[in-house]
């Protein structure tokens, strides 16, 4: 019988140690959704896009990094049951094969417009084709599994739009074989669990106009998940704020304070609006910083204790089972696409 529950899918590249932006932007929301929806029959696909990893430098060992990335989901509270699937993209060859088929429907203009491509290629004499083609592989990752909800940070929304566009174009030209993922707005609402959801972009602590990113090498700009809780506390206490002197959510004029409010809401699983009301009228930035520093440090302490108790073998076992499942589903969809284009 066909599963009518929506598939929820996400991936995080394992190029290096993850930071708080990954954790709050994707891992925590995914864990919350997975624990809720896997019980009611949704498939929860959590994969490591290792083919996406090799477009750029990898810090350390990719295999070790990807095992650690998957451990992070478990340490964050993911409950595994028969509907939760872990897999490596490279172990499911249908991803690359569908990418090629979709490449033949995507245009150079579309890919040229991708902000991430512009950012990653800016000022470089030579850029590899993988960086250019990256969003099409991401579309294949999603479309192979009929995934409707794809929890990602706000920086990936443009890729979700492209995925929808490519699927629509293919369905129109050949046959309705692809399910369109929900619009970014719907994704954000689904992730937040209310109709006010907006995409999450955790900001750089020192330069809050920018997102927290592993490519910023300034230590105080980001909180790594491996940071000692005390170090994390200090980083939050030294976060850049402003001179307005009001604790309110205004990402445009007060990105530093707004970022702290967002972090506090996400770490504690509290709706942002509730937190904004709690702090309304307050003026002491130090109080807010102290509260956030405590929340983040406590979270890191608990999480780091749990991650040490998960073995590599546990993850490898989950990968073996998940890859068997993923190949079955992905090959069926790939065959349909191949038939459509006459292969
Ligand atoms: P990647 O590996 O760069 O980042 C993984 C996820 O973390 C989110 N993220 C953030 N969210 C909030 N605030 C931040 N500062 C922050 N930094 C990173 C990203 O939005 C992302 O969701 N293309 C994807 C990986 C991918 C994928 C997919 C995701 C490949 N195929 C299919 C979903 C579905 C990427 O490079 O993310």
Image (cartoon, rainbow, N blue to C red):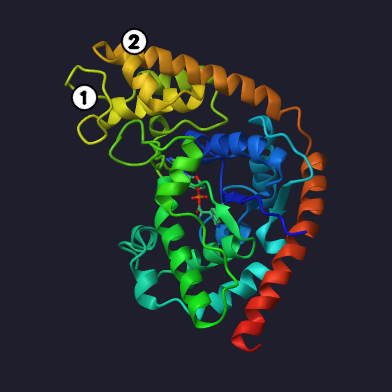
Is the residue marked 1 within 8 Å of ligand 1, measured from its CB?
no
Q: Is residue 89 left or right of residue 55?
A: right
| Residue matched to label 1 | 242
Q: Quadrant of the C terminus?
A: bottom right
Residue 186, percent from left and from top: 44, 48
Q: Quadrant of the N terminus?
A: bottom right
Residue 271, percent from left and from top: 43, 26
| Residue matched to label 2 | 287
- Does any portion of residue 154 appear in the rendered image? yes
Q: Is residue 298 left or right of residue 189?
A: right
> Based on the displayed image, in which of its 4 quarters is residue 273 positioned?
top left
How would you rate the neighbour count of disc 1 (Cα within 10 Å): few for under 14, some for 14-19, many for 20 or more? Answer: few
Q: Give the mark nearest the N terminus, 2 or 1.
A: 1
Residue drawn 48% across and 79% down?
105
- Does any portion of residue 231 appear in the rendered image? no
- In the picture shown, does residue 204 fall above or below 267? below
């Amino acid at each position: 019988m066909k599963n009518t529950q929506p598939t929820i899918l996400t991936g995080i590249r394992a190029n290096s140690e993850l930071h708080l932006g990954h954790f709050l932007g994707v891992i925590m929301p995914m864990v919350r959704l997975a624990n809720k929806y896997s019980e009611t029959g949704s498939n929860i696909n959590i994969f490591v896009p290792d083919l996406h990893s090799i477009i750029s430098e990898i810090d350390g060992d990719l295999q070790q990094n990807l095992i650690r990335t998957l451990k992070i989901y478990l340490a964050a509270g993911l409950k595994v049951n028969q509907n939760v699937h872990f897999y490596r993209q490279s172990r499911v060859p249908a991803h690359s094969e569908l990418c090629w088929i979709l490449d033949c429907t995507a245009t150079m203009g579309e890919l040229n417009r991708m902000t991430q491509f512009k950012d990653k290629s800016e000022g470089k004499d030579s850029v590899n084709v993988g960086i250019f083609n990256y969003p099409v592989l991401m579309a294949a990752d999603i479309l192979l599994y009929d995934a409707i909800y794809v929890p990602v940070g706000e920086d990936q929304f443009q890729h979700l739009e492209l995925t929808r566009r490519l699927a629509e174009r293919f369905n129109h030209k050949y046959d309705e074989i692809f399910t369109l993922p929900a619009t970014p707005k719907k994704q954000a609402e689904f992730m937040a669990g209310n109709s006010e959801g907006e995409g999450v972009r955790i900001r750089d602590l020192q330069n809050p106009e920018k997102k927290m990113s592993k490519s910023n090498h300034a230590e105080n700009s980001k909180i790594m998940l491996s940071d000692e809780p005390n170090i994390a506390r200090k980083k939050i206490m030294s976060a850049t704020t402003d001179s307005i002197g009001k604790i309110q959510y205004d990402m445009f004029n007060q990105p530093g304070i707004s970022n702290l409010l967002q972090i506090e809401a996400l770490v504690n699983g509290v709706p942002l609006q509730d937190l904004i009301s709690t702090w309304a009228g307050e003026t002491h930035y130090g109080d807010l910083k102290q509260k956030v520093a405590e929340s983040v440090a406590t979270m890191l302490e608990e999480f780091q204790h749990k991650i040490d108790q998960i073995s590599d073998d546990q993850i490898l076992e989950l990968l073996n089972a998940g890859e068997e499942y993923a190949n079955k589903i992905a090959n069926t969809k790939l065959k349909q696409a191949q038939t459509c284009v006459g292969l």
